[in-house]
Amino acid sequence: MSITSLMPVYPRCGVRPVRGEGAYLIGEQGERYLDFASGIAVNCLGHGHPKLVKAIADQAATLMHVSNLYGSPQGEKFAQRLVDATFADTVFFTNSGAEAVECAIKTARRYHFANGSPERNTLITFSMAFHGRTIGTISATNQDKLRDGFEPLLPGFRYAEFNDLDGALALIDENTAGFLVEPIQGEGGIRPATPEFLKGLRKACDEHGLLLVLDEVQAGYGRTGKFFAHELYGITPDIMAAAKGIGGGFPLGACLATEKAAKGMVIGTHGSTYGGNPLAMAAGEAVLDVILEDGFLDNVAKMGDRLRQALEQMIPNHDHLFDSVRGHGLMLGLKLKSDSRRFVAHARDNHGLLLVAAGENVVRILPPLTIDESHIAECVERLSEAARVYVAASDE
């Protein structure tokens, strides 16, 4: 047998973590890595946060799982806290971001069905989007690397250029249900929506009776210094997918919606075996406790500004390699003038710095939201040394 026991769909590197401490991962041989990838924006409280660890342990000893056939005091409490803190009136809990987006798509389609317009079932989505790996969510992107070999894909999606408002509006027709968009594209290269674009989509939805569906799986949950990224733009969605940071490392996602948008989501229209189980709810509540502490998000914004300034000050010293910084808060992208994936591997393997590659030759910098200035200084020092060695090796 030649296939590995773990299905070989990931190009796994040589880093093999067995333990985490705050902003650091520790490998099998005791090697330490500064983790500015955070499980791709998942470990928002870092590794081993005492409040999260205790909440999970206490709940695991009490009650881990029951069917959604029964009442959920844990889910009701957590959902109400999210409703109180956001635009939403109702929440469906999932196990992942892809599931949250799937629920969002279904909610949008079902809204028009309930209103007597089942033909309005098409969502307009955007170039370089990433919404997940299910058949439904890869159908919602135009990226060939996600779609190749999985045809036939699902109908019900049309594609416009990201940040091209006129192009998006031109696609509206009698079959349009709404727009599905990331306020800041992560996989696509840390590309923020322009205010004109996102506000224009909101305005078009209001004028045409459409729904604005936001994918905040990566950009949400404090990552930008706001609870959710759409707050930066002064707009609210009708439906929103959240995940990654919401569980701090525990598998958890959520689809949030207004009462109006969730009109069609009645008994029997959706479900999940594990979604909203008591263990996940305990993890979610612990993370929310920390995120909503007075001053926490302000400090994320402050650390984001410090990190951005430090990166921008570093760039002139390596301007043959680095181009610019983009993003908000602690969701930053460092654009390179060469292959970002090669540089990420170099920084990881030779300098103990964990980063994430993205589109447009961008390196994603996604540290825990709990970092302090010492971590920023260490990151920039490792980045600078990695750049010096990388370029010297390339010149040889």
Image (cartoon, grey):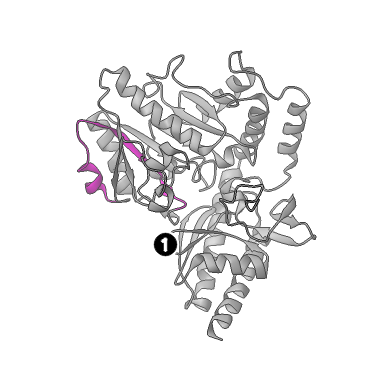
Asked if residue 369 is positioned above or below residue 352 in the image, the reply reads above
Farthest residue, direction bottom:
396
Dot 1 falls on a residue whose secondary structure is: loop
- Residue drawn at (46%, 52%) of the image: 187
Residue 237 at what x, y percent from top left?
A: 38, 34
Q: Where does the magenta region start and end?
A: 163-187
Residue 288 at what x, y percent from top left?
A: 61, 35
Report whether 314 appears left or right of 104.
Answer: right
Badge 1 is on which residue?
A: 360
- Residue drawn at (53%, 85%) of the image: 395
Asked if residue 276 is positioned above or below residue 11 in the image, the reply reads above
- Residue drawn at (57%, 33%) of the image: 95
Q: Is residue 164 magenta?
A: yes
Asked if residue 332 is positioned above or below residue 98 in the image, the reply reads below
Q: Residues within 10 Å of mark 1 (few under 14, many from 20)?
A: some
Residue 60 at what x, y percent from top left?
A: 75, 28
